[in-house]
Image: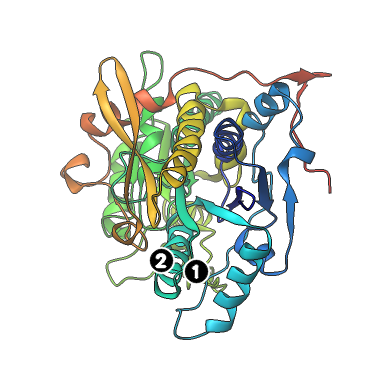
Amino acid sequence: MGMRNIIVGQSGGPTSVINSSLAGVYKTAIERGFDKVYGMLHGIQGFLDEQYVDLSTQIHSDMDIELLKRTPSAFLGSCRYKLPEIHEDMEIYEKIFGILDKLEIEAFIYIGGNDSMDTIKKLSDYAIVKGHKQKFLGVPKTIDNDLALTDHTPGFGSAAKYIGASTKEVIRDALGLTYKKEMITIIEVMGRNAGWLTGATALAKTEECEGPDLIYLPEVPFDIDVFLSKIKDLLKEKKSIIVAVSEGIKLPDGRYVCELSGGGDYVDAFGHKQLTGTAAYLANFLGAEIGCKTRAVEFSTLQRSASHMASRVDINEAFMVGGAAVKAADEGDSGKMVVIDRVSDDPYMSAAGIYDVHKIANNEKTVPRAWLNKTADYVTEEFINYIEPLIQGDYPPFMVNGLPQHLVLKK
């Protein structure tokens, strides 16, 4: 009998709970009797350079696992690397499987979003065609919440919690600055084609907070003239106006709003334009058109790295899906992604399910049009009811000298 080894990697934009999935993979693999748990450094791209580590040299105790759950960003390092189609470059696949055979890998677990599931799909297809025995499982991860067939994705709940809380704080700040003057604040939230995160700004609407005045998602074309008219109407009623926009809102002609300021030139390996400057452009536009004080606030990478604001529900579910992937591989599944199924809303309960990755990879789940109001400038109660259970509970960081402690890879 050969060794029973498993390897896990992380890919794409990290989240504040991505390492909880990694902890779930490691703990479950040890409990199920795998001999070694390897971590690939910087995803499949690092793996091609034979960059990997035995995780038992990094995780020595349950305390380390608890620290890992509370550590933001990708503990193993990430990448944005698109595997070629199998027929385009067989050598890359032969190299990957050569390394897997050398390490006696039985299961390959990849934690990531849409593009990462594309990697699982291609590797599992190649294994079937060439008769390789390794199992390939995907673990969902993305703050964008745009993966198909899963109720939601680990990382989304914590990002939504941070966005809701930060929006409340921005609103309070703005209200303190509008004595005898008007001010418009534009909040820019991550989201290329899906507005789940931007919709989360509506969580700021509570007993003691009005919430944002307008919310614009990329699912519906953005009419800048209608927008200007609405702002002018709002200024007749109040001095402080808060608008939340997705970074990916587009004009009716298909251009990103951020491109109007010259942004969006950089394109990554998957053909995604870098989106930045949407709020800045709109703030400058309104300042010129209306003549009052405007400001742009970008939550930027804080949305995905604020582990001190992580949701307990989110961390626990991230751990659950990591463990479920190991269990599925151990029981013979391959070419699948673990999903989160919502079992109940009140009380909220979820469970891990599993679906064919071919039905998930390269498919984006967007906010249903019915979850936006008629004028597409705010989300509905259904949206709030969907998102609220996901932000519940806290996972207090371990504080050292007043700051959160993290687990850091020792190379």
Mark 2 / mark 1, whichever is N-terminal:
2
In the picture, the disc for residue 368 is none
- Judge left or right: residue 95 versus residue 337: right
Check if mark 2's residue and mark 1's residue have beta carbons within 8 Å.
Answer: yes
| Residue identified by numbered label 2 | 256
Q: From where the camera sits, is residue 155 visible?
A: no
Residue in the picture at 49% in, 71% down: 270
Q: CA distance from mark 2 to mark 1?
A: 10 Å
Q: Nearer the viewer, residue 109 or 153?
A: 109
Q: Nearer the viewer, residue 390 or 48?
A: 48
- Judge left or right: residue 145 versus residue 297: left
| Residue identified by numbered label 1 | 273
The 10 Å Cα crowd at callout 1, few under 14, some 14 to 19, many 20 or more, is some
Q: Is residue 255 above or below residue 211?
A: below
Residue in the picture at 62% in, 64% down: 101
Q: Residue type at mark 1?
A: Lys
Q: Is residue 86 above or below residue 128?
A: below
Count of number-bearing discs: 2
The answer to which image quadrant residue 35 occupies is top right
Q: Residue type at mark 2?
A: Tyr
Q: Residue furthest bottom?
A: 88
x and y percentages locating residue 120 in the rendered image: 46, 60
Q: Residue furthest front?
A: 1
The answer to which image quadrant residue 75 occupies is top right
Residue in the picture at 22% in, 34% down: 380
Which element carries disc 1, helix, strand or loop? loop
x and y percentages locating residue 235 in the rendered image: 35, 37
Residue in the picture at 34% in, 29% down: 351
x and y percentages locating residue 9 in the rendered image: 60, 52
x and y percentages locating residue 402 in the rendered image: 79, 18
